[in-house]
Image (cartoon, rainbow, N blue to C red):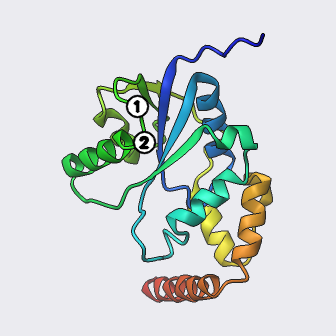
Amino acid sequence: MTTKPMYTFDYLVFIGRFQPFHLAHLQTIEIALQRSAQVVLALGSAQNERNIKNPFSALEREQMILANFSETEQQRIKFVHVIDVYNDKKWVQLLKDVVNQVIQPSAKVGLIGHFKDDSSYYLRLFPEWQLVELDSLKDSISATPLREAFYRGEIQTEYFPNGTIQFLQQFKNTTYYSQLQQKFHAADDSNLEDV
């Protein structure tokens, strides 16, 4: 008879944009899966329009993320979509509402993340969820330079798990990619003119 693993949490919530999903994100979810029966990934900036900062739709990000996990692990990962709301109080309420739709009532819920910079203040906005604070993972990978390299045609494979690499290679063949690439280069050119 196999015994069920003992988890500290029923659910651990991990908030991110995952644009794109890199090795530090992967490591965070692996830690969350060790500590929690299920992991809820709150995909930020889940509105429909694409831009240079948010090139991938919420559903594409789900596919990209799940491609890096086994079937058993995939069954323990849930997704919620959170659109941008530029008011902390409303955003917190929205996030709690969508999380509550996928968890069991009276479950033990925690929040996992690390204080990367000033933008990480949101981790303090959920006092009812116990915070699992992580140290910086994988040398503080930032998605911004990885996106910029991607628009220049490079996939910096040393920062991505295999599922993400495959997703990015396929995405490069889409019309979305060429449109975003044009926008990126146009923005780059206009920045050069300001210098």
Q: Which residue is mark 1?
A: 104
| Residue 78 vertical placement versus 49 (above, below) | above
Q: What x and y, as percent, mark residue 97?
A: 29, 45
For residue 138, say whether it is visible. no
Residue, x 49% and y 69% (percent of image)?
Answer: 53
| Residue 50 vertical placement versus 5 (above, below) | below
Query: Which quarter of the figure is the N terminus placed in?
Result: top right
Q: How many marks?
A: 2
Badge 2 marks a residue whose secondary structure is loop
Q: Which residue is mark 2?
A: 102
* Mark 2 vs 1: CB contact within 8 A: no
Closest to the observer, 123 or 146: 123
The span from disc 2 to disc 1 (Cα, nearest Å) is: 7 Å
Residue type pointed to by label 2: Val
Q: What x and y, as percent, mark residue 170?
A: 75, 74
Residue, x 31% and y 33% (percent of image)?
Answer: 126
Q: Quadrant location of residue 85?
A: bottom left
Badge 1 marks a residue whose secondary structure is loop
